[in-house]
Image (cartoon, rainbow, N blue to C red):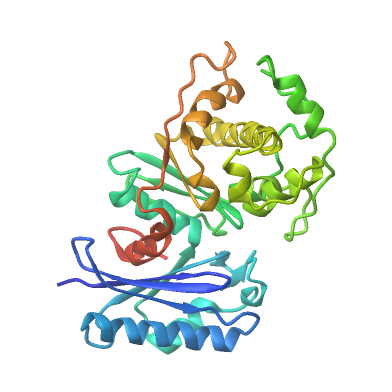
Amino acid sequence: MRVRIGIDLGGTKTSGVVLAEDGSELARLRVATPRDDYPATLEALAALVDALEVRAGVAPGRATVGVGAPGTWQPRLQCMKNCNSTWLNDRPLLHDLRGRLGARVRLANDADCLALSEAADGAGAGFDTVFAAILGTGVGGGLVVHGRLLQGPNGLAGEWGHTPLPYFRQPTPWADEPAAGRRFQLESGLDDRQCYCGRINCMETFLSGPGLARTHAALGHDRLAAEQIAGRRSAGSRETWDLYLHMLARSLAQVVNVLDPSVIVVGGGVSQAPGLCGDLQARLPAHAFSSVAGQDVQADIRPARWGDDSGVRGAARLWDGTNQT
């Protein structure tokens, strides 16, 4: 029986799962991620793999290992880049893991793993082109075409969260909906945002959970966590959420313009807000390239079937088919 281990390396916790050939789960574990300590992180990952093998009754070295990490594996430089877990940056993570665990290790961005999982047996199953967006502590994306994960020569394919928010503080081409003027009035009061990557006004600084909370406070409302704002229990949170949806819809419209995916799957903590996908499907077409204000554009937007488990399940699937990392 073919056995695959998946690891989702997070900033505060690291999850691991063992999948059988049919995708059923054989074992699961979660450990704390050693923050700001690269050698300790390596040892924690290796120890987690060892423990998963024991828990699943798998002989050491028999299972393949896939790791999803919060950043970019740069194939040319053979090191990690763009990690919000900054102690991983410029480190040869794949080389070091293979040194500890053998050549059976593959590595990908955590959003790539989400896309791979949902394309295989999740909300994107059966579709030719699947774009997956993470809306959580950060914002990222992954792209699967005909079952194959696309990463690019720089490992940057799908890094949607680190492009500028489109039409920030400007009217969009099709801003003819009744509340559009009010939204742009609110947006004009928001300051430029410095992203940890060094750029200004990246989508992540607005569309992530922390970005949503920052917008709410900037509009003069009480400080609330992202999930509280998404619950829309007050007039202030409803106002902020409406603006957030407007930003997100026009940001995803850029994905439609460039890739026109068969389906967009959204995951991450913010994606769990009630009605998010339906609201986005209604709003997105007005911001896509169209001669009739989006009336001839349709977007299929779905929540991730596997929820928080998509990343770790996708990491296990890095060895499936033609996915070469």
Please indicate whether residue 99 sits to the left or right of residue 239 in the image: left
Foreground of the two, 34 or 201: 34
Foreground of the two, 146 or 142: 142
Q: Residue furthest front?
A: 234
Foreground of the two, 71 or 248: 248
Q: Residue at x 40, y 42 (%)?
A: 130
Q: Residue at x 63, y 67 (%)?
A: 81
Picture quadrant of residue 194: bottom right
Picture quadrant of residue 23: bottom left
Above or below, 100 against 200 in this view is: below
Q: Position of residue 273 (x, y in %)?
A: 51, 43
Please indicate whether residue 23 sits to the left or right of residue 249 in the image: left
Q: Position of residue 201 (x, y in %)?
A: 76, 46
Above or below, 224 against 260 in this view is: below
Q: Position of residue 203 (x, y in %)?
A: 67, 45
Q: How many marks?
A: 0
Q: Residue at x 48, y 39 (%)?
A: 274
Quadrant in which the C terminus is drawn: bottom left
Q: Residue furthest top?
A: 292
Can residue 106 be seen at all in this image of the molecule? Answer: yes
Foreground of the two, 19 or 129: 19
